[in-house]
Amino acid sequence: MARLSLKRLFRHRLWDEDDARRVLPADALARLQQRVAASEQRHSGEIRVCVEASLPLSYLWRDAPARERAVTMFGKLRVWDTELNNGVLIYLLLADHRIEIVADRALARCVEPNHWQQVLDAMGEAFRAGRFEQGLNDAIDAVDALLVKHFPRDAASAGPRPNELPDAPLLGGRRGL
């Protein structure tokens, strides 16, 4: 195993779910959940937020990138399984200081990759300043704007829209999700 991999392994063994809860306490998670729920009343998409303190060992042994884990969580959380294929996962890996956004195919076709990079850059700036909730709020707002633009809620729809995925952010630690 390369030196960098040993360093990464050690860093991931130090981070756990308690660290994730310190970064995003229960009240912050509740506010993020409310923001996702409010957003989803404006469009037909689904937004999931997943924050992991560290990667499972199986990822570390392979020196897998955060993007691989984000794509796996996109599938595991069934974000890909929305009716209109317009779900989005906002993924934060604390130990590696990595942020990923995985958009399902319908939305991905509408948005240029450089736009996603701008969203990631803004999130990264907030996270580097220790403003994790604000960075996630900004990401939710950016994804919301894209979904409203490309998949607005049908004005003819009466009543509440069906919620295909949970709105609560998912928090994980060393044991994985």
Image: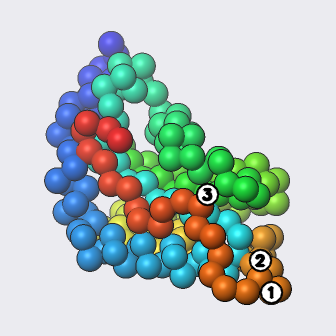
In this rendering, the label closer to the viewer, 3 or 1: 1
Q: Earlier in the sequence, mark 2 or mark 3?
A: 3
Q: Which mark is residue 155?
A: 1
Q: Earlier in the sequence, mark 3 or mark 1?
A: 3
Q: Is residue 44 left or right of residue 46?
A: right
Q: Which residue is mark 3?
A: 88
Give the residue at x 41% y 73%: 32
Depth check, front residue: 85 or 148 = 85
Give the residue at x 30% y 20%: 3
Q: Is residue 5 left or right of residue 90?
A: left
Give the residue at x 57% y 46%: 78
Quadrant of res 88:
bottom right
SS category of the residue bearing label 1: loop
Q: Amino acid at mark 3?
A: Val
Are the residues tagged 2 and 1 within 8 Å (C-beta)?
Answer: yes
Q: Position of residue 66 (x, y in %)?
A: 46, 39
Depth check, front residue: 162 or 149 = 162
Q: Is residue 31 left or right of residue 67?
A: left
Q: Which residue is mark 2?
A: 152
Q: Residues within 10 Å of mark 1 (few under 14, many from 20)?
A: few
Give the residue at x 48% y 37%: 69
